[in-house]
């Protein structure tokens, strides 16, 4: 099928799916609805979820009768490298310490860019590591380990 | 009048201490820095610094964070004028005429009028804030839960009306934001909702994670996708002070920009971006000879730059008087206040006058600092612009990661933020404006709370929202706004306003 307005079509699907998912979760997990005067924890999310779901369907239907722009291709390369670097930072920083985690993050993230210059990125990583440790650990006293925990 | 003076005196006594001055300066410096640098804005920066402000005194924390927001308005114009890239989204229109002035060798005059216009606007907005806040807070004390619910409805609808792009998608983003805000423990029953037995989620999704994922990470991915092209126009800045002729031509534009910006800043969903767009459009409309617009008309720089600075400051009014954030930056300020154990609302002014007035006076001092930072020191900022993006974005990433991780010293928040980075990128691809989502997210729990209380008080009678006069008025305005935007003629105008070049 040819989509006339892909951006709105997929937006509609997204809103409908998320909205109804919230409403269904309220029902499946049996969050109490309560009454209008004593609303339970399920009341407001159930109403909102259904409202969003219906809105999504309206957007979807409207997209079938209007014209609009297509969804451009996803840039998976930066997505993977940037978010991957971030996730690795989060998972390892306690173990390897801030210094190593920052240099690793900078190196991984630079693969997401257009050009990769190892020496330049390494220097950038080192400067950032020294600077951040100075400001955040010594200056603002955030509780980060600086060096890998297996060193001492 | 006398009360105003004694309040301002109290403010001066707080804001003129060496420590307060230092934090104000740090805020202004940081603000200018991120304003100049494209690809990072005040939302991501404030989100990044939020965990670090925990250790500061509340006054200093808020003085610094406020400085970042209005400082960014100054810095944004520098990049817009010299590089033709808006350093800040509120400087998009400044680039139109500012860059053309730079090409004609009048970069200095453009920078000068932008800074002086901003300073003037900042002073007026500070006075307005000081004068308007106490009476508004008095009204706010009369508000019950029904009024608060209606007020938030009005705020969200205004955010829809003022958002870019499709109205119906903006409504969707608000509902989505409200729902995401409800994740976590329900305050009334103590029941964990939508947390799927993940203990970290029972505290809810962190606002910082949402803001930084969408405005930090997604932004970086988008920029990397588009590729880097930047041409710095630095060969000749020229004399910084505008000539007498420039001033004569620009001052009415500064006045109009300040007035319009102050007004739009107060409106929910408004803020600096909308203010600069509208001010530019207005100037072009009323100019007798508009042929020079887009070719280096000084009015095209003066009006939007005054407007965005005025709006940045007046957007504190609803936050400080009603406790309701009109835009994402103010939503972060709510977070900053809550970290310090302060509930935003009308009581801040009476219970913590030194905080309230100290912050207001610091804005005026900050504006003075910014003129100095931005005019004589312009050379430093220009140098900064030559830093390539491939070195810049890893630095932004590092600061973001440190900020998110220190929220709770666990990997969980970092993972959530990464998820929202991807979500934010999907929003970009689908043309879904994220600002309404953030507003909904912060207002979600407050709305539910007030809805429940209002319904409890009225014993389940929903007509309470229309039988109480204040509440009915607010809902009436919301309805009117919705109707107006549905009118075909206005709809077309609105689209034009946002497509503007």
Image (tube, coloured by chain):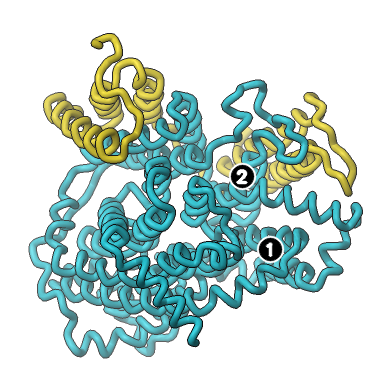
**How many neighbours does mark 2 have within 10 angstroms: few (below 14), some (14-19), or many (20 or more)?**
many
Tell me residue B92's x, y (percent): 36, 62
Determine if residue B412 is in view: yes
Labels 2, 1: front one: 1
Tell me residue B22's x, y (percent): 26, 58
- Which quarter of the figure is the C terminus of chain B placed in? bottom left
Q: Residue at x 57, y 47 (%)?
A: B437
Q: Is residue B478 above or below residue B332?
A: below
Tell me the colour chain B is drawn in.
Answer: cyan
Q: Is residue B178 left or right of residue A7?
A: right
Q: Residue at x 71, y 71 (%)?
A: B477
Q: Is residue B306 above or below residue B351?
A: below
User: Label 2 lies in what chain?
Assistant: B
Q: Is residue A71 above or below residue B265?
A: above
Q: Secondary structure at mark 1?
A: helix
Q: Residue at x 36, y 63 (%)?
A: B70
Near-viewer residue (A71 or B353): B353
Q: Label 1 belongs to which residue?
A: B151
Tell me the colour chain A is drawn in.
Answer: yellow
Tell me residue B466's x, y (percent): 83, 67
Q: Label 2 belongs to which residue?
A: B177
Q: Quadrant of residue B228?
A: top left
Q: Quadrant of residue B402?
A: top left
Q: Are marks 2 and 1 in contact (CB under 8 Å)?
A: no
Question: Among all residues in the image, which is located at the extreme top?
Answer: A150
Tell me residue A74's x, y (percent): 44, 32
């Amino acid at each position: 099928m040819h989509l006339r307005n892909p951006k709105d079509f997929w937006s509609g699907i997204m809103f409908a799916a998320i909205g109804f998912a919230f409403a269904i979760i309220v029902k499946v997990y049996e969050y109490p609805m309560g009454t209008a005067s004593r609303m339970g924890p399920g009341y407001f999310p159930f109403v909102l979820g259904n409202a969003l779901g219906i809105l999504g369907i309206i957007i979807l239907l409207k997209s079938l009768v209007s014209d609009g722009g297509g969804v451009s291709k996803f840039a998976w390369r930066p997505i993977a490298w940037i978010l991957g670097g971030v996730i690795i930072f989060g998972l390892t920083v306690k173990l390897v310490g801030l210094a190593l985690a920052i240099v690793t993050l900078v190196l991984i993230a630079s693969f997401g860019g257009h050009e990769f210059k190892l020496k330049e990125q390494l220097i950038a990583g080192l400067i950032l590591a020294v600077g951040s440790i100075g400001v955040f650990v010594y200056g603002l006293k955030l509780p980060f380990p600086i060096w890998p925990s297996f060193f001492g | 009048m006398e009360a105003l003076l004694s309040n301002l005196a109290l403010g001066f006594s707080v804001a003129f201490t060496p420590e307060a001055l230092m934090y104000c300066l740090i805020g202004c410096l940081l603000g200018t820095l991120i304003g100049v640098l494209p690809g990072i804005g005040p939302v991501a920066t404030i989100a990044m610094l939020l965990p670090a402000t925990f250790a500061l005194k509340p006054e200093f924390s808020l003085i610094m964070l406020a400085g970042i927001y209005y400082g960014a308005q100054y810095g944004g114009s520098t990049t817009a004028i010299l590089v033709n890239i808006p350093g800040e989204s509120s400087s998009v229109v400044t680039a139109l005429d500012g860059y053309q002035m730079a090409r004609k060798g009048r970069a200095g005059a453009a920078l000068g009028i932008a800074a002086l216009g901003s300073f003037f606007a900042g002073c007026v907005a500070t006075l307005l804030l000081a004068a308007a806040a106490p009476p508004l807070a008095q009204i706010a004390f009369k508000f019950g839960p029904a009024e608060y619910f209606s007020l938030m409805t009005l705020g969200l609808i205004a955010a829809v009306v003022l958002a870019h792009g499709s109205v119906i998608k903006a409504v969707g983003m608000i509902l989505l934001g409200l729902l995401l805000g409800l994740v976590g423990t329900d305050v009334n029953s103590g029941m964990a909702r939508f947390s799927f037995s993940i203990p970290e989620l029972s505290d809810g999704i962190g606002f910082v994670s949402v803001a930084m994922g969408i405005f930090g990470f997604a932004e970086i991915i988008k920029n990397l996708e588009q590729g880097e092209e930047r041409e710095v126009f630095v060969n000749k800045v020229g004399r910084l002070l505008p000539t007498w002729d420039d001033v004569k031509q620009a001052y009415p534009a500064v006045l109009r920009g300040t007035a319009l910006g102050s007004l739009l800043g107060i409106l929910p969903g408004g803020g600096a971006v909308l203010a600069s767009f509208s001010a530019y459009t207005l100037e072009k409309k009323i100019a007798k000879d508009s042929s020079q617009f887009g070719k280096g008309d000084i009015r095209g720089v003066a009006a939007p730059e005054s407007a965005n600075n005025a709006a940045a400051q007046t957007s504190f009014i609803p936050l400080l008087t009603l406790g309701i954030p009109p835009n994402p930056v103010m939503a972060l300020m709510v977070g900053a206040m809550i970290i310090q154990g302060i509930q935003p609302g009308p009581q801040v002014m009476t219970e913590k006058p030194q905080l309230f007035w100290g912050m207001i006076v610091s804005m005026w001092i900050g504006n003075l600092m910014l003129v100095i930072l931005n005019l004589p020191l312009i050379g430093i900022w220009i140098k900064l612009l030559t830093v390539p993006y491939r070195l810049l974005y890893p630095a932004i990433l590092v600061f973001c990661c440190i900020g998110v991780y220190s929220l709770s010293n666990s990997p969980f928040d970092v993972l959530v933020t990464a998820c929202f980075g991807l979500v934010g990128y999907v929003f970009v691809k689908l043309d879904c404006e994220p600002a309404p989502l953030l507003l909904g997210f912060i207002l979600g729990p407050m709305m539910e709370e007030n809805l429940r209380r209002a319904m409890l008080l009225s014993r389940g009678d929903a007509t309470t929202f229309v039988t109480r006069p204040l509440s009915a008025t607010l809902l009436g305005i919301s309805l009117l706004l919705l109707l107006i935007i549905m009118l075909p003629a206005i709809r077309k105008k609105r689209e034009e306003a946002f497509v503007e070049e």
